[in-house]
Amino acid sequence: MESVGNKTSQDLQLQMRLLGEAAKKAADKLTRINSEIKTEALFLAAEAIRNSVDSILAANAADMQKAAKRKLSNALLDRLALDNNRVSAMAEGIESIANLPDPVGVVVGEWDRPNGLKIQRVRVPLGVIGIIYESRPNVTSDAGALCLKSGNAVILRGGSEAALSNAAIHSCLVQGLANAGLPETAVQYMPTQDREAVGILLGDMSEFVDVIVPRGGKSLISRVQQDARIPVMGHLEGLCHTYVHAAADLDMARKVVVNAKMRRPGICGATETLLVDQAISDSHLQFLITDLIEAGCEVRGDEFTQKIDSRVKRAEDSDWNMEYLEAIISVRVVNGLDEAMEHIRQYGSGHTEAILTEDNLAAERFLNELDSAILLHNASTQYADGGEFGMGAEIGIATGRIHARGPVGAEQLTSYKYVVRGSGQTRPK
Amino acid sequence: MESVGNKTSQDLQLQMRLLGEAAKKAADKLTRINSEIKTEALFLAAEAIRNSVDSILAANAADMQKAAKRKLSNALLDRLALDNNRVSAMAEGIESIANLPDPVGVVVGEWDRPNGLKIQRVRVPLGVIGIIYESRPNVTSDAGALCLKSGNAVILRGGSEAALSNAAIHSCLVQGLANAGLPETAVQYMPTQDREAVGILLGDMSEFVDVIVPRGGKSLISRVQQDARIPVMGHLEGLCHTYVHAAADLDMARKVVVNAKMRRPGICGATETLLVDQAISDSHLQFLITDLIEAGCEVRGDEFTQKIDSRVKRAEDSDWNMEYLEAIISVRVVNGLDEAMEHIRQYGSGHTEAILTEDNLAAERFLNELDSAILLHNASTQYADGGEFGMGAEIGIATGRIHARGPVGAEQLTSYKYVVRGSGQTRPK
């Protein structure tokens, strides 16, 4: 943890206040900026990133060195590491966001009243967004670009382990803003690693910040939910289920289940628990287990599953609550659709669930009766992704129920206002 | 304040937990209930209210007696008082909510992906809503009915001064639920007036409650924002402005300004500050002031306004921040559209603002560049109302920026989920 130096708590309060005021001013300006300028700023930021590969990689190397000394896990080091390809991907990411349609100003509803009032519902930016995230430096460019696209000012706060990488990337975003004539404070990076500064951001800046988006592990999320006095757009865990129904096609199930867990076991849309219908446990389960194990997955099953294959470890009760985010899966045999849905209601995190079946009536019940953000029939849970939904880049998958649910892209980072045109109407008593 | 009796804090925690669990169970059931049953429950609740006029009025008389002893203000007593007409209006309100289209299950977006996945965005209930309100007993029936219509379970917490009235109305809602075969716990009323119970609702029930809707004065709202660990759909003050632009039609301005302030000075959409363009202060201002004063309004003006009419009291700086909610208005002369918008940005609460002008370019700038929930051209700010927008009954006007903004009706009390239909798709690496 970096030290606060000679800053007193009051200095920090003041510093954060200035940050907030600058963000609010920038947001006010962005509300009324036309699309072309935002797009130009994004292309210029992408260009700045391409031109700054060396300095970004140097900053990242310094972060990696420090991280190695702090003995961070390999998974964490992998998330932190940048190379030429990853830096190019960042620039491309910004360009693809630049090419998205501008969500702001779109009329999303329009109707006339009998008294002649003409009402429109028009999309507007949210205002100032605070994003608190961990590890992966590309969140800096993705989140900064998405917020700018949607006309929002943003205050970014990345993990201390990526401080130098994030600063280098952030300075490219600022170059893009400046070169397009936009306020540089439209995308700000928190100037201190002091944890107290996060407390101020969460607790004392409701005057300036409209919504907080936390992206990270459970401890970050729970701190944010505890301390925030500002609306939070939560991205909780993805404890996703795939249910192989009695009428599932075996070949499809084998293909989809392995993909749902093993394509990338570490993303929030990865399946963590496989539910297999008792009716097909004899015909399907052995294949599914074998496929998973051969793909390098550890399988932890209930008693029934263990009997099928001795390589299956015994699942503890706690396994049904586990978001492994690695090559481990829990497997349970259930007695029909209702028991499968009951399991999902009890243990799911409301993120993404899939049913595999050729029985459309069963599928429709699953899709209608469950209430996760994303429900799939005959497809891999790994599709839980804004890009795969055709929404462009995303800031994450919201698991809360208010405002946005599921992938949060540029459109989800907007609010709306009502514009009403009249001809002198007064409201009767 | 009622006493807690022999309840310990732990008892209260347990009691609230049971309340929350029951609400969650009811919400789970409501998610999957069909429209007809919800509609039937609402009609039966309206019928129960009509059949219970005597007991509701008796309960209200007891509340009024207690309130008179506590020397509550006349405004408060008026809000609390029920009579035959007001009880009938409650029943009619429930019936009009029953007749609204069901927002749940509506497909609000639908598209196909190149890989064949068919994606739908479908409206779902929010879940469990906690509503904390003051004084007016009809909020009990309005809010309860709106939540039920939108498939949500609700925990109601009204003001202690209306405890008996609210209980009588609540029991009618429960009769409606029971007679339609719905869980009675779909609409619960907090069983205690203990203030600590509100603290528990706000702070310790995130497991059960999805969103808190506070309806009331500043002190209630600020308590909720300070203590809530659950998303809040805020209904802050309505510090609404009407700006009479240089190109305003005098007759229209006179008619609209008086309506905007005086039709009902106590509603959140009432204009609190009148801005008049310097260019027309000679021709228009005297008429506007005279009309307001003759309608019984106290006028507090800037130096300029005072010179026009000696009956105008001097506005203090604090007046620009005042939501009077009574027959008082502050008046300021501004030098053009930009100064008017600057004033509104500085002092407005983001609720509702109107411009009166025959200059459409000026009007469009006002509508586009300001960012309040509702912006009107040539119409009274008193139209800030869900019913007037054609949205049916409302729970209030949201002034926050996330989730719902402006009138919160049945549709705004919903979330959405994604339903994805495939044919065995797996996500490529």
Image (spheres, coloured by chain):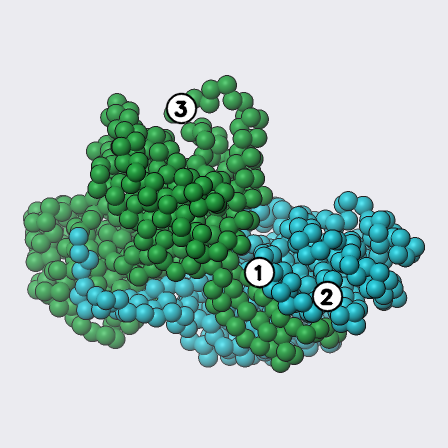
Chain colours: A green, B cyan
Q: What type is the residue that disc 3 sits on?
A: Glu
Chain of the residue that carries numbered disc 3 in the rendered image: A
Q: Which residue is mark 2?
A: B247
Q: Give the residue drawn at x 17%, y 56%.
A: B428
Residue B296 position in % (x across, y down): 86, 64
Please check whether the numbered discs 3 and 1 fall on a single chain. no
Mark 3 in CB contact with mark 1 (< 8 angstroms) = no
Front of the two marks 3 and 1? 1
Q: Seen in the image, is B301 located left or right of residue A364?
A: right
Q: Which residue is mark 3?
A: A2
Label 2 CA crowd tier, 10 Å (few <14, some 14–19, many 20+)? some
Q: CA distance from mark 3 to mark 1?
A: 44 Å
* Between A304 and A260, the one nearer to me in the picture: A260
Q: Give the residue drawn at x 52%, y 64%.
A: A122
Label 3 CA crowd tier, 10 Å (few <14, some 14–19, many 20+)? few
Quadrant into which the C terminus of chain A falls: bottom right
Q: What type is the residue that disc 2 sits on?
A: Ala
Chain of the residue that carries numbered disc 1 in the rendered image: B
Q: Note whether B186 is above or below A299 in the view shown.
A: below
